[in-house]
Image (cartoon, rainbow, N blue to C red):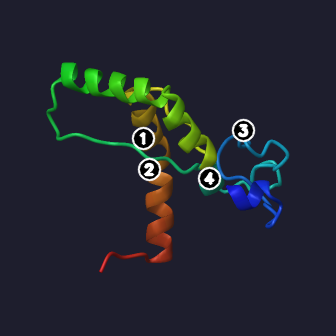
Amino acid sequence: MSRLLSNSVRPIAAFGPRRMSKLPDVATLEEQGFVDPIGRVAAWHGISGPAGLPDAIRDRLSALFVEGGRNEAVKRVLDNAGAEPAADWREMTRLIREEGPVIKAMVTELGVRLD
């Protein structure tokens, strides 16, 4: 992100459904006419637990991560990377359900394999 903000490289598009808060003048791929679903997928990171994890534990862990995302030091790290914390486990679940199949199709089409 620092290179983008210092103008040592020129961004040509933002992945995802909306422009990046750190680069509001950089149009999304979709805004530039690239309408393939992969252009709407933004980079995301998350944690997961084992199947059958009790709801109370899931909810508590989610709340702690949301709280952690409000910490000033964490916010600075995320901001420097151009990232924004997800709202909670429901948001992460939505991202996986909506964007996971798009990513899987791209990986399959490209023939990407783990060796």
Q: Which comes sooner in the sequence, label 3 or label 2?
A: 3
Residue that carries the numbered disc 4 in the rendered image: 37
Q: Can residue 21 be seen in this view?
A: yes
Q: How far apart are marks 4 and 3 (CA)?
A: 21 Å
Front disc: 3 or 2: 3
Q: Type of residue at label 2?
A: Gly
Q: In which quarter of the image is residue 18?
A: top right
In terms of secondary structure, where does tag 3 sit?
Answer: loop
Q: Do the residues labelled 2 and 4 touch (CB within 8 Å)?
A: no
Q: Type of residue at label 4?
A: Pro
Q: Residue at x 28, y 27 (%)?
A: 61
Q: How far apart are marks 2 and 4 (CA)?
A: 11 Å
Residue that carries the numbered disc 1 in the rendered image: 97
Front disc: 4 or 3: 3
Between residues 93 and 44, which one lies in front from this camera angle?
44
Q: Which comes sooner in the sequence, label 2 or label 4?
A: 4
Residue that carries the numbered disc 3 in the rendered image: 21
Residue that carries the numbered disc 2 in the rendered image: 100
Q: Type of residue at label 1?
A: Arg
Between residues 59 and 102, which one lies in front from this camera angle?
59
Q: Are marks 3 and 1 in contact (CB under 8 Å)?
A: no
38 left or right of 64? Answer: right
